[in-house]
Image (spheres, rainbow, N blue to C red):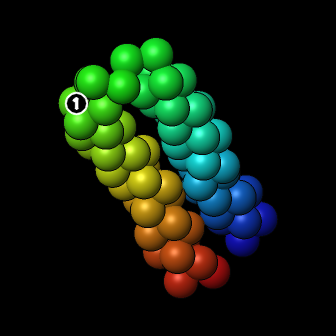
Amino acid sequence: MNLISIGIGIAVFTGFGAGIGMGIATSRATEAVARQPEASGKINQMLLIGLAFAETTAIYGFVIAILMLGRM
């Protein structure tokens, strides 16, 4: 039971990593738009694709934590 609790804690940390990554990506995209406003459409498109992948990682970690919680 103790090892499952540790696994749940590790799985929840994927949300922290995804949040930090999304913050960094958003700040870099904002800087890129400030430097080249004419490329804002392309930058926003790439940003949204990257944010979707990062959010998917957080959701997978959340689902794994819920599944492990059911095993307790």
Q: Is residue 25 above or below residue 18?
A: above
- Quadrant of the rendering where the C terminus is positioned: bottom right
Position of the N terminus by quadrant: bottom right
Q: Nearer the viewer, residue 57 or 39?
A: 39
Residue 42 makes an appearance in the image: yes
Between 38 and 58, the one lying in front of the other is 38
Q: Residue at the far front: name it.
A: 38
Looking at the image, is 36 positioned above or below residue 24? above
Q: Position of residue 61 (x, y in %)?
A: 50, 58
Residue 36, above or below 33? above
Question: In the figure, 68 relative to 61: above or below?
Answer: below
Q: Would you say 8 lies left or right of 45 here?
A: right
Quadrant of residue 24 within the rendered picture: top right
Nearer to me, 19 or 4: 19
How far across and how far down the image is residue 16, in percent? 66, 49
- The residue at the point 36 percent across, 25 percent down is 37
Which residue lies at the image location 49% right of the left edge and 55% below the top edge? 58
Residue pictured at 27% horizontal, 24% vertical? 39
Q: Quadrant of residue 27?
A: top right
Look at label 1 and name its amino acid: Lys
Mark 1 element type = helix
Q: How many marks?
A: 1
* Left or right placement of residue 45 versus residue 72 in this view: left
Q: In the displayed structure, does residue 51 sit left or right of residue 71?
A: left
Residue 51 on image: x %, y %: 39, 45
Q: Is residue 53 visible to us here?
A: no
Q: Which residue is mark 1?
A: 42
Circle 1 packing at 10 Å, graded few (<14), some (14-19), many (20+), is few
Q: Residue at x 31, y 32 (%)?
A: 40
Residue 8 location in percent, x, y?
Answer: 64, 63
Indicate left or right for 52 with 23 as reference: left
